[in-house]
């Protein structure tokens, strides 16, 4: 078999990329360090993907074996110095000693950590534990800060928990989908295909998106309505939808009276003429009649569902918009059964899990506020340490404090904040100002340029643990080989905590999950043993739901009654003017994944080898730009160069790019504006100018 290039054994595991969380059979040859993946085959029995996969997942194994992997720890005195390879003992000692010294001189709160939505639940759990117990503060945040933190806030405020309401199978029972701010065929391809299948069987779709994405029109798909709303006008749009529903009597009075609170105040708000499609048309750029028709279609469907992505959350009113979507679902009784609901499409494979595991500065695992003494007591008793009751710093606050001199040491776990975060000049200045930056990653990424200690990490093919996908489904990640760096990532974190004076150790990742289950009510029934025996499960898994929970809020909302929140539209402060007359919005493409650190090191590297700037033919003509020209893209905060692509998928006045490549660095131009509630950056609205730099 080996000579024929055939696999000799297979291991079932979960994709390392997007929040669909497809399950695969990794078919391999060899054993130990000589293990080699022959192919990845999607599993028919996989809860999320039913035998399907996409071009990213199939080739993911490529980056795990890439020569760029750094397999040994390295240190250096300053970021100008060359890296020096050291032993694990020296590297961990250096990290612990460095953080301790900073805290002695500048206080307990002068250090913190960032956890990763690409790491397992067990790894995220130990990182937040290290920060809270060994660092002694709550300066722990997650990269979800820059994507779905408004989902956490908005759904918690309205429905009572920070998670999507349905499983993926629910889409097979929907009659009308409202898709807003998401491009599933590129960013969540397997689920995008499932949506298309449902559309072919007669369901209808309303697409609210500034671009003419694939689900607007493609072979066998024709959206009932494409609403090309202007970037930054989401809340005005959703209020207009609610206005039509309420003023035309399409709301579900019985559902509202039986299950919701603050109903009258919300109905009065929605009825206000200022929220009508006509009054909001200037802000949204939409035809009022089309908005009315879309609202009628959604509200009169037997089962109407909402699917959304970062085009909802990455705005100055991201949290408001999430609440607006929940309002619309409650208003029409579209919650608590199959085929309906409010469903965030999560970007990274474990965004849901990293939030569930307590890596926000104000919440312990299971979304319980750090100020609650009875919740702190659970961990204080178990960990034998006193926890700070005050929320810690969020990522942007860490950067500001670093520039102010009060925050000096950062542990960055599996994230590339020097490429992914907005206004990179500010991020890089903050990193440069710190005394100790520790990066744990597979590759020397952009953030590692500012690091003093580099700790090598393990790929998903070397990990034992769980990921939680966008439908709250915990799937097993199983190692096909031992870690190439000699230690599991959770082990490394435990050793840092121990060296700092807080002993932390586990015999296995399974033991970490046992601790999570023992301390977090929504995970009480989860164990590796059950997942291995019964397959993936959707939380809550506990006494009330022993087999898990495909649909949430069935009889009552997690918070008891659903809360309707008046969502007043406040325009972003980012405005176009004569100097910056266009709006830039950013997103993803099918073959690449986020900052591209992984996909650029797989077979996918040959597709979409650079980020391009899409612009409408009229904007291109005005500036003398043709496809293939190099253009200069500038905003109030920075300038970068990109190749132009003239495309009628864009609307006039709006340009679009991705951020998969560090060279072009789209985030050099994105601003520091952020969501009022969560500080999620407003990646989707930047006023820019575009000019030809080099004609092709
Ligand atoms: Fe992986 Fe997402 Fe593609 Fe599934 S859809 S194979 S989880 S990237």
Image (cartoon, rainbow, N blue to C red):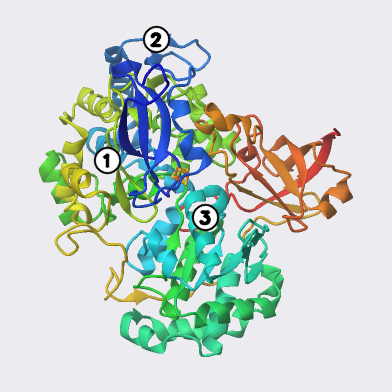
Name which residue lies at 36% across and 33% down. 26
Mark closest to the chain's N terminus, 1 or 2: 2
State whether residue 333 appears in this view: yes
Q: Of 694 and 395, which appears nearest the observer?
A: 694
Say whether residue 538 is left or right of residue 209.
Answer: left
CA–CA distance in space, label 1 to label 3: 31 Å
Vertically, is 172 above or below 389? below
Disc 3 versus disc 2: distance between alpha carbons?
Answer: 44 Å
Q: Nearer the viewer, residue 404 or 97?
A: 97
Q: Is residue 352 above or below residue 30?
A: below
Q: Which residue is mark 3?
A: 192
Q: Position of residue 466 (x, y in %)?
A: 29, 41
Q: Is residue 165 left or right of residue 541?
A: right
Q: Nearer the viewer, residue 109 or 231?
A: 231
Residue 32, percent from left and from top: 29, 18
Q: Residue at x 67, y 77 (%)?
A: 290
| Closer to the eye: label 3 or 2 | 3
Q: Tell me if residue 453 comes above or below residue 539 in the rendering.
A: above
Q: Quadrant of residue 156?
A: bottom left
Q: Residues within 10 Å of mark 3 (few under 14, many from 20)?
A: some
* CB-based contact (under 8 Å), mark 3 and mark 2: no
Q: Is residue 570 visible?
A: no
């Amino acid at each position: 078999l080996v000579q024929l290039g055939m696999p000799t054994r297979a291991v079932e595991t979960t994709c390392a990329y997007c929040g669909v969380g497809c399950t695969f059979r990794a078919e391999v040859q060899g054993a130990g360090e000589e293990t080699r993946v022959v192919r990845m085959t999607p599993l028919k029995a996989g809860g999320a993907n039913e035998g399907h996969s996409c071009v990213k997942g199939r080739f993911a194994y490529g980056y795990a074996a890439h020569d760029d992997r750094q397999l040994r720890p390295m240190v250096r005195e300053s970021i100008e110095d060359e890296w020096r390879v050291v032993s694990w003992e020296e590297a961990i000692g250096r990290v612990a000693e460095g953080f301790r010294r900073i805290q002695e001189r500048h206080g307990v709160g002068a250090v913190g950590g960032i956890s990763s939505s690409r790491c397992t639940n067990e790894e995220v759990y130990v990182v937040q534990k290290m920060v809270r117990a060994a660092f002694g503060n709550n300066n722990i945040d997650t990269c979800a800060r820059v994507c779905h933190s408004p989902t956490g806030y908005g759904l918690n405020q309205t429905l009572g928990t920070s998670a999507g309401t349905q499983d993926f199978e629910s889409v097979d029972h929907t009659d009308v989908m409202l898709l807003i701010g998401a491009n599933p065929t590129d960013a969540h391809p397997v689920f995008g295909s499932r949506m298309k299948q449902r559309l072919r069987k007669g369901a209808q779709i309303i697409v609210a998106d500034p671009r003419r994405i694939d689900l607007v029109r493609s072979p066998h798909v024709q959206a009932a309505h494409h609403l090309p709303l202007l970037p930054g006008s989401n809340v005005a749009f959703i209020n207009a939808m609610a206005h039509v529903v309420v003023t035309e009597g399409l709301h579900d009075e019985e559902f509202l009276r039986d299950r919701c609170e603050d109903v009258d105040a919300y109905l009065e708000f929605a009825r206000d003429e200022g929220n009508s499609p006509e009054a909001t048309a200037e802000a949204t750029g939409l035809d009022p009649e089309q908005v009315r028709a879309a609202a009628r279609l959604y509200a009169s469907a037997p089962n109407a569902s909402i699917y959304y992505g970062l085009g909802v959350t990455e705005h100055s009113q991201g949290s408001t918009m999430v609440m607006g979507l929940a309002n619309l679902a409650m208003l029409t009784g579209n919650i608590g059964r199959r085929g309906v609901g409010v469903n965030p499409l999560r970007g990274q494979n474990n965004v849901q899990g990293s939030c569930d595991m307590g890596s926000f500065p104000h919440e312990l695992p299971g979304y319980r506020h750090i100020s609650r003494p009875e919740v702190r007591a659970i961990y204080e008793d178990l960990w034998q340490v006193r926890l700070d009751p005050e929320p810690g710093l969020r990522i942007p606050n860490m950067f500001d404090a670093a520039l102010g001199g009060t925050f000096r040491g950062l542990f960055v776990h599996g994230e590339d904040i020097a490429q992914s975060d907005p206004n990179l000049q500010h991020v890089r200045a903050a990193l440069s100002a710190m005394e100790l930056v520790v990066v744990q990653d597979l590759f020397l990424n952009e953030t590692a340029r500012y690091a003093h200690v580099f700790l090598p990490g393990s790929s998903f093919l070397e990990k034992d643990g769980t990921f939680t996908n966008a439908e709250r489904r915990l799937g097993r990640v199983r190692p096909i080989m031992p870690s190439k760096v000699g230690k599991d990532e959770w082990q490394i974190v435990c050793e840092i905590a121990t060296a700092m004076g807080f002993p932390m150790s586990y015999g296995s990742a399974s033991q970490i999950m046992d601790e999570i289950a023992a301390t977090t009510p929504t995970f009480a029934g989860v164990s590796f043993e059950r997942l291995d025996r019964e397959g993936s499960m959707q939380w809550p898994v506990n006494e009330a739901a022993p087999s898990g929970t495909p649909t949430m809020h069935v009889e009552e909302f997690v918070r008891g009654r659903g809360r309707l929140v008046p969502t007043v539209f406040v325009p972003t402060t980012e405005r176009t003017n004569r100097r910056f007359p266009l709006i830039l919005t950013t997103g993803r493409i099918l073959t690449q994944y986020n900052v591209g650190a992984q996909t650029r090191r797989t077979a996918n590297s040959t597709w979409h080898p650079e980020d391009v700037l899409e612009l409408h033919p009229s904007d291109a003509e005005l500036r003398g730009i043709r496809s293939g020209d190099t253009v200069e893209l500038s905003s109030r905060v920075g300038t970068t160069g990109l190749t132009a692509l003239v495309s009628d998928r864009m609307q006039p006045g709006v340009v679009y790019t991705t951020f998969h490549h560090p060279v072009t660095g789209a985030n050099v131009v994105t601003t520091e504006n952020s969501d009022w509630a969560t500080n999620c950056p407003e990646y989707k609205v930047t006023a820019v100018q575009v000019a030809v730099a080099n004609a092709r």
